[in-house]
């Protein structure tokens, strides 16, 4: 089913993808099993902002990730995972990924980072094979978006804590309205996504709107492209 939504925010949730958009003045959502299913359902979308690393170095860390950690600052900087280098994108186990990563640029690759590798690979594959998608899909990071909403200061409180969730929700309420935000949180079942995933998807949608209005900023300020021609930048 094609959804007539032109600006979408996306966050990973329970092994799938939670998409959020606005239609007829109301925040809507749907969960998709794969990036391909999401793009097929939103084929008319011109901006799809996704919380996933896009654009990978052949060796060495991405400047994007370092800049994002500096922007968020403090304890929450650790929420910015290092993107994998392209040479391990097809690794099937953490030991294999770490061994290959170390052989290429001297750094290992931890279990937590390996946990998101299949999701990075899924979007990377789609973008490499679909030139049209490259023009519409943008990388975002919720903690960067929340820091921007928060006047340029990262939020110290963890997103899974009660106070941290409330604070992030309050920032989103200023952007979308209390009723809209609370209504969306109520409609997304725990089977579909955790409450913090809903807030992250909304933060991605906030950034997507800024991209659409040409008011978004990027880390770095002048985005580079990787060896496959994919953008390396977090938009907010």
Image: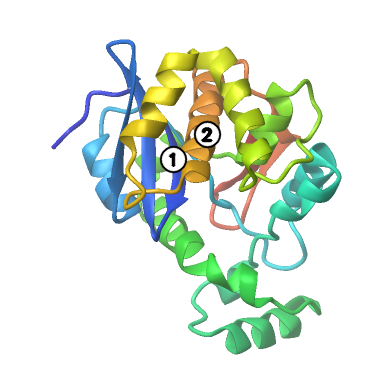
Quarter of the figure with residue 137: top left
> Would residue 178 be seen by someone viewing this image from the given angle?
yes
Seen from this angle, which residue lies furthest left?
A: 1
Pointer 2 with pointer 1, Cβ within 8 A:
yes
Task: Give the residue drawn at x 46%, y 61%.
Answer: 119
- Location of residue 80 in the rendering, given as x and y in whole percent from the top left corner: 70, 52
Along the viewing direction, whichever of 210 and 192 lies nearer the viewer: 192
Say what secondary structure mark 1 lies in: strand
Q: Residue at x 81, y 29 (%)?
A: 153
Up-down: is 38 above or below 60?
above
Which residue is pictured at 42% across the width and 15% down the height?
Answer: 179
Quadrant showing the C terminus? top right
Secondary structure at badge 2 equals helix
Q: Nearer the viewer, residue 56 or 66?
A: 66
Number of residues whose C-alpha sits closer than 10 Å to that of mark 1, classed few (under 14), some (14–19) or many (20 or more)? many
State the residue at coordinates (76%, 43%).
68
Image location (x, y in percent) of residue 29: 32, 33
Q: Which residue is mark 1?
A: 10
**Can residue 213 be spotted in the picture?**
no
**Mark 2: few, some, or many residues within 10 Å (few <14, many ≥20)?**
many
Left or right of residue 29, residue 172 in this image: right
Gap between marks 2 and 1 measured at Cα: 6 Å
**x, y percentage for residue 41?**
22, 39
Question: Residue under circle 2?
Answer: 204
In front of the other: 203 or 45:
203
In this orientation, which residue lies closer to the viewer: 196 or 152? 196
Relative image position of residue 187 (x, y in whole percent): 31, 33
């Amino acid at each position: 089913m094609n959804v007539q939504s032109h600006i979408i925010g996306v966050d990973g949730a329970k092994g799938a993808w939670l998409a959020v958009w606005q239609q007829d003045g109301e925040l809507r959502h749907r969960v998709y099993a794969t990036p391909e299913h999401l793009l097929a359902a939103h084929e008319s979308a011109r901006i799809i902002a996704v919380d996933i690393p896009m654009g990978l170095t052949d060796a060495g860390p991405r400047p994007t990730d370092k800049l994002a950690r500096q922007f968020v600052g403090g304890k929450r900087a650790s929420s910015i995972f290092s993107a994998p280098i392209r040479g391990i994108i097809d690794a099937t186990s953490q030991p294999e990924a770490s061994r290959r990563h170390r052989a290429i640029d001297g750094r290992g690759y931890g279990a937590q980072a390996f946990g998101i590798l299949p999701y990075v690979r899924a979007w990377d594959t789609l973008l490499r094979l679909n030139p049209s998608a490259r023009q519409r899909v943008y990388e975002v990071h919720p903690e960067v978006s929340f820091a921007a909403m928060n006047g340029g200061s990262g939020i110290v409180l963890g997103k899974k804590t009660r106070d941290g969730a409330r604070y992030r929700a309050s920032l989103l309420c200023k952007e979308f309205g209390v009723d809209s935000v609370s209504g969306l949180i109520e409609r997304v079942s725990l089977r579909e996504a955790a409450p913090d995933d809903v807030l992250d998807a909304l933060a991605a949608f906030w950034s997507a709107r800024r991209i659409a209005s040409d008011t978004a900023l990027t880390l770095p300020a002048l985005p580079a492209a990787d060896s496959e021609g994919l953008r390396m930048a977090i938009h907010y």
